[in-house]
Amino acid sequence: MLAKEADRKSASTDDESVTIQLPLAEQARLNRERADQYHRYHIEATETEDRQKYPRRFNVKVGKVGLARLLFKEFFKYFGHWDVVFSRPCTYGVFSGPVGGFSPRPDLCVGCLRCEIQHPEFVKVTHNPELASLGDSYMTSKHIATIDEEARKGSVPVRGQGFRGRFGGPGFDQMFTDMSEIVRPSRDGIHGRELIGTSVDLGSKPMRLEFTADGKLLDGPKMMTIQVPFVYTAPPDSVGTGIVPEILAEAAAQVDTLVFLPESTVTAQGLASPNVVPMIAPSKIGNIESHGNGTRMVEMTYWNPDAWKQVKEHPLLVSVRLPFSGDWKSTMMEMVDQGVSIIHLVSDYHGESDDGRFVMDLYQEAHFSLVEKGCRDEVTLLGTGGIAGADHLPKAIITGMDAVGLDLPLLIAMQARLNGDTKSRGAAEVKLPSKLDKEWGVQRILNLSCSWRDQLLEILGAMGVREVRRLRGETGRAMWCGHLEQEAFGDIEGFPGGGH
Amino acid sequence: MGKEWPKPSPKLLEKTHHLMHDGFHQRAFPDTRYDLPEALGDARWTDELIASTWYMAETGKCPEHLNYKTGKSGGGFDKLAFKELAPEQQLSADAEVDITLALNRRGDERVKRTIDVPWYGGGMSYGSVSVNVMMSRALNAKKWNTLMSTGEGGYPPQLYECAENVITQVATGYFGVEEKSIQAAPIIEFKYAQGAKPGLGGHLLATKAGEEVAKMRGSVPFVSLFSPFPFHSTYSVEDHMKHLDWIKTVNPTAMMSVKVSTPHDVDMVAVGSYYAGAHIVHLDGSFGGTGAAPEIAKKNIAMPIELAIPKVHKFMQDEGIRDNVTLIASGGVRTADDIAKAIALGADGCVLGTSDLVAMGCTRCSNCEGGPSGRGCPWGLTTTDAELQEWVQQAWGADRLDKYYTALADRLKEILRGLGLSSVGDLRGRTDLLRYMAGGEA
Ligand code: SF4
Ligand code: SF4
């Protein structure tokens, strides 16, 4: 009876082409087809080996005489018990080469120290100083090693044992992120059964729908969506042309995000596409017309009210770059008043303004100024500078950014070595691997992007937040180490500013 | 499919044990010719902390030549010191000091249990560690009239000989949860979250989920196992209460412990847990140990235990329930000094995990999840590999822990005597006895 009734019902869907009467089986088949067409967003990660030898974590030194003596002794002591004679302390294969410990393979060492503890008389395992020397005071060797692993594997770094580092710290380490204890969060989302959204909108969100007198929907404000809350920003001048922009443009297309590149590069290398944002100086803003091939957005490289007037009504989205220097906040407010809907705030590579303030404070200041003005959703804030690890991404968003610009991590993913001034934007000397090719570079960037997105999902899942848009400016999700210490230790003698 | 390695021969066992045990000795004692390994230790567990734990586990005493009190993390416990009284005001070295801890403060009909030391062993599941490690901990817990938790991986049959000292954990994946093990336990621990991966559930990598582990967990060998987060039947404190009622029908006398991590509203969660029926509220801070966790979670999600304890303690006081609940702290508690500081900040006692492993030889190398070999801990701790797990023998492990606990207990009593206190209960919440070392480490 029920089946018969159902048979008579229409397989009505939003798609008007399927509003005919269908038998149940046919209806099911069509539903299946539609379901199969559904494509959940993901980034295609594939393990991609290093192109140049990365400094190993540990050096392993074996005293040959001591080893020979031990082997000689054990040969006679355990004669006939060959499993004992040939046993090795290392389960990772460091001493399993053709001549065993006489030619160890320190690249395989993970620092368990079993060899050194068992044979202190002739084995020594030390941290590799070459690894420690990578990076600078901000982008540390630990950051670089982690990015390299992420770009190689495309997965979330997982390790045993607890945290090994310092309590709190400067920069982004001042913040712990919250989690939700009992209410249902989105752990299922992390493993793909439920969706946690990572897409964000760029542009001005419609605050209300507007209609013409005869009831037709008027055009809403211009905006677009990218699938991840991060964009790729222009590399330093030393690698600003050639293969690097090509790699970034291709990776941006595959991830469905954006890459910001100087317009001269875009034009010279023919990179114009929906995922490439040409950066145009105000004096040349008229060039906006010349970027075709699906270009959706351009960036004006600094604020100029006259240039803005020329492009304000242009159908392309236009972001305006604003460095954290001088009285940036007044400039930002002026830009908002003039109708700029995407403001790209930029600090140096260490995440500092020209007066040494850190982006976490600056981002909050920018975000809350707009909240106070009552126009936060009419403006997109992009923040670039100081992102050195996956955890910095949600933290920058919590402090008020809609999306974040990646800079040095992209180069590190391609195994670049940085020399000279590694703080000033654009000035760093970058040495890329000699065997850099496009396919390899693109996959490394995809892997990094996949790993960072997955880590963002971990943070969102722990909080029970189902889309990253809702994390923006959610400072209630931040726990500030300094505040917590004040609360916990404020009445203890010696605590700065408190105590008996 | 992972490779099963053969059990080691008796001769290989003998050699390896000798080398390992002698190695720990050589590094922990001052009268040998070897320095601490250069690559040993980190900011939280310094080389000296690790070596001093080995020393204590061999001698039952605190070393004079190593810093066995604090690490170099630059915050939390490492910034706190005790305000010792002048020598003439301290209790004499032979004065009796009570360090026992009563766990049931609700005054209900459930089991009343007082443990001899204000700490017990935290959950480490079968699978993340071997039966040998579990039994070492359980045998020692029995000797010390304290407890250890199964973690979420089932209840290996051998553990029943120590059932009075074993807490059965029920966690979100319900792996290995059986009526029998619930009925055997004096305490049932509901694990809502774990400090090292708060809000992320659990994960046993495929390489560690071998035949025996899978059998115990009712799963397929060598397939990764995820414990979801949170309990999918719990959306509120009321739902949580249903959980506790369910256990009560299976074991009417068991005490209930609720293990949670340390979010913003940890104080509310703790109070809610108490009203739902918990005897023990167990806070697990974000710097705690783990068999495997995303690196991003360890440092960033939730707060360190030092910051959560006073928050919960004060809130429970304000709610007028503080004396009806036992507040236990874990997640980065490494030493007797840490235990005493946690209590001074407001806890009743602590749970130890990593330090038990360090006492049995852990070097904190972070390869517990399997490492590149896929076999787990090369020291035989966090592994169920047939060969490697034999490096830790039950009697040896229990003896190391026994001596380690002896040293901890002695040091805790020494701290109390230095503060003029004859009972560890008198230390609870006494932040006035602490000093914050703003300019340096304690
Ligand atoms: S430290 Fe561990 S991993 Fe490294 S060589 Fe020695 S035994 Fe092998
Ligand atoms: S692998 Fe073993 S030694 Fe290394 S941290 Fe884990 S338990 Fe400790």
Image (spheres, coloured by chain):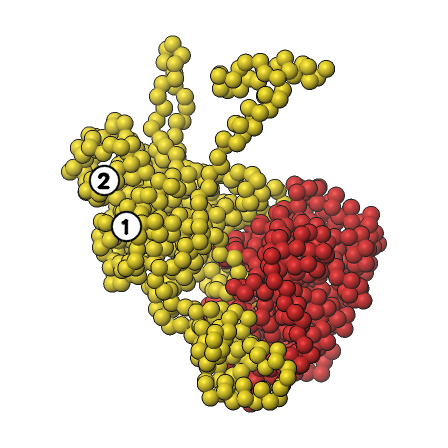
Chain colours: A yellow, B red
The secondary element bearing badge 1 is classed as: helix
Q: CA distance from mark 1 to mark 2?
A: 14 Å
Residue projecting furthest to the left: A283
Residue at left 52%, top 48%?
A458
The amino acid type, in three-letter code, at marker 1 is: Val
The amino acid type, in three-letter code, at marker 2 is: Gly
What numbered label is drawn on residue A349? none
Does A171 sit left or right of A233 as displayed? right
Question: Which image quadrant is residue A491 in?
Answer: bottom right
Q: Position of residue A147 (x, y in %)?
A: 40, 57
Mark 2 Cα within 10 Å, few/some/many (few <14, many 20+)? Answer: few
Residue at left 20%, top 32%?
A290
Q: Position of residue B204 (x, y in %)?
A: 61, 56
Mark 2 Cβ inside 8 Å of ligand 1: no
- In the picture of the structure, the residue carrying the numbered disc 1 is A244
Q: Position of residue A435 (x, y in %)?
A: 30, 58
Evaluate if marks 1 and 2 touch, with contact meaning CB atoms under 8 Å apart. Answer: no
Question: Which image quadrant is residue A374 in?
Answer: top left
Mark 1 Cα within 10 Å, few/some/many (few <14, many 20+)? Answer: many
- Compared to A24, does B149 lie above or below? below
* Mark count: 2
Residue at left 74%, top 52%?
B177
- In the picture of the structure, the residue carrying the numbered disc 2 is A270
Are dots 1 and 2 on a single chain? Answer: yes
